[in-house]
Image (cartoon, rainbow, N blue to C red):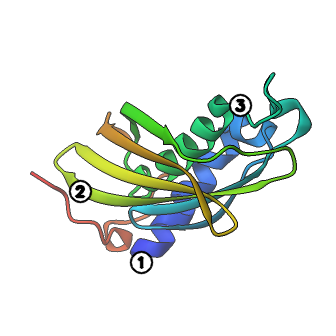
């Protein structure tokens, strides 16, 4: 199994149980080793009292892309920390695209950068730190399928 196939199978396994992201209308448009892209349209019920997209939904989108990127190795991984910087407001109807990219991964820890865009505009930047917790997202049939070297 190639690293891209591992990432795809990991994403499929996570998506099957990710009720939160599904209920917000998100979709995973791309996934690979250490990276993921997730898309969400800002709905009218995601707008706050200032008539702009609620930052919590932008954070959730970025966090979801981060989750799919850091789980792309079929190693169960959770967020240790996450922070976001909002750069531009969003509006109902905006299609937001969050692209997560691994910056560094060593041992059980990883650091990921997520850029959230609306068209050509960057609306937010997110940084997440991950921690592997043990376990996998799916069972592999044989050791021959596993291209990922175990870290010591």
Q: Are there few (<14), some (14-19), or many (20+) residues within 10 Å of tag 2?
A: few
Q: Are there few (<14), some (14-19), or many (20+) residues within 10 Å of tag 1?
A: few
Residue pointed to by mark 3: 54
Residue that lies at the very extreme toward the top in this rendered image: 49
Q: Are marks 2 and 1 in contact (CB under 8 Å)?
A: no
Residue that lies at the very extreme toward the right in this rendered image: 44
Q: Point out the tag, 2 or 1, that comes first from the N-terminus.
A: 1
Task: Find residue 71 and name its label.
Answer: none
Q: Gap in Å between the C-alphas at discs 2 and 1? A: 21 Å
Q: Are marks 1 and 3 in contact (CB under 8 Å)?
A: no
Q: Gap in Å between the C-alphas at discs 3 and 2? A: 30 Å
Q: Nearer the viewer, residue 106 or 73?
A: 106
Q: Nearer the viewer, residue 138 or 151?
A: 151
For the residue labelled by badge 1, is the local secondary structure a helix, a strand or a loop? loop
Q: Is label 1 or label 3 in front?
A: 3
Quarter of the image for residue 74 reads bottom left
Residue pointed to by mark 1: 2
Residue pointed to by mark 2: 104
**Residue 69 pos. (x, y %):** 45, 55
Residue 137 in view: no
**Residue 84 pos. (x, y %):** 46, 38
Quarter containing the N terminus: bottom left
Q: Is label 2 or label 1 in front?
A: 2
For the residue labelled by badge 3, is the local secondary structure a helix, a strand or a loop? loop
Give the residue displayed 43% in from the left and 50% down from the top: 71
Q: Point out the tag, 1 or 3, that comes first from the N-terminus.
A: 1
Residue that lies at the very extreme toward the left in this rendered image: 152
Q: Point out the tag, 3 or 2, that comes first from the N-terminus.
A: 3
**Residue 98 pos. (x, y %):** 58, 56
Q: Are there few (<14), some (14-19), or many (20+) residues within 10 Å of tag 3?
A: some
């Amino acid at each position: 199994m190639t690293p891209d196939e591992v990432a795809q199978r990991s994403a499929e396994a996570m998506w099957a149980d990710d009720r939160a992201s599904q209920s917000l209308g998100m979709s995973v448009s791309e996934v690979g080793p250490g990276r993921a892209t997730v898309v969400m349209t800002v709905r009218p019920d995601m707008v706050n009292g200032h008539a702009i997209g609620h930052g919590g939904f932008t954070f959730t989108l970025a966090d979801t892309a981060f989750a799919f990127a850091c789980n792309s190795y079929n190693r169960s991984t959770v967020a240790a920390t996450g922070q976001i910087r909002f750069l531009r407001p969003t509006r109902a109807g905006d299609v937001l695209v969050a692209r997560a990219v691994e910056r560094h991964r060593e041992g059980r820890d990883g650091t990921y950068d997520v850029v959230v865009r609306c068209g050509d505009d960057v609306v937010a930047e997110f940084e997440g730190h991950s921690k592997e917790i043990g376990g996998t997202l799916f069972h592999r049939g044989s050791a021959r399928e596993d291209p990922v070297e175990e870290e010591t």
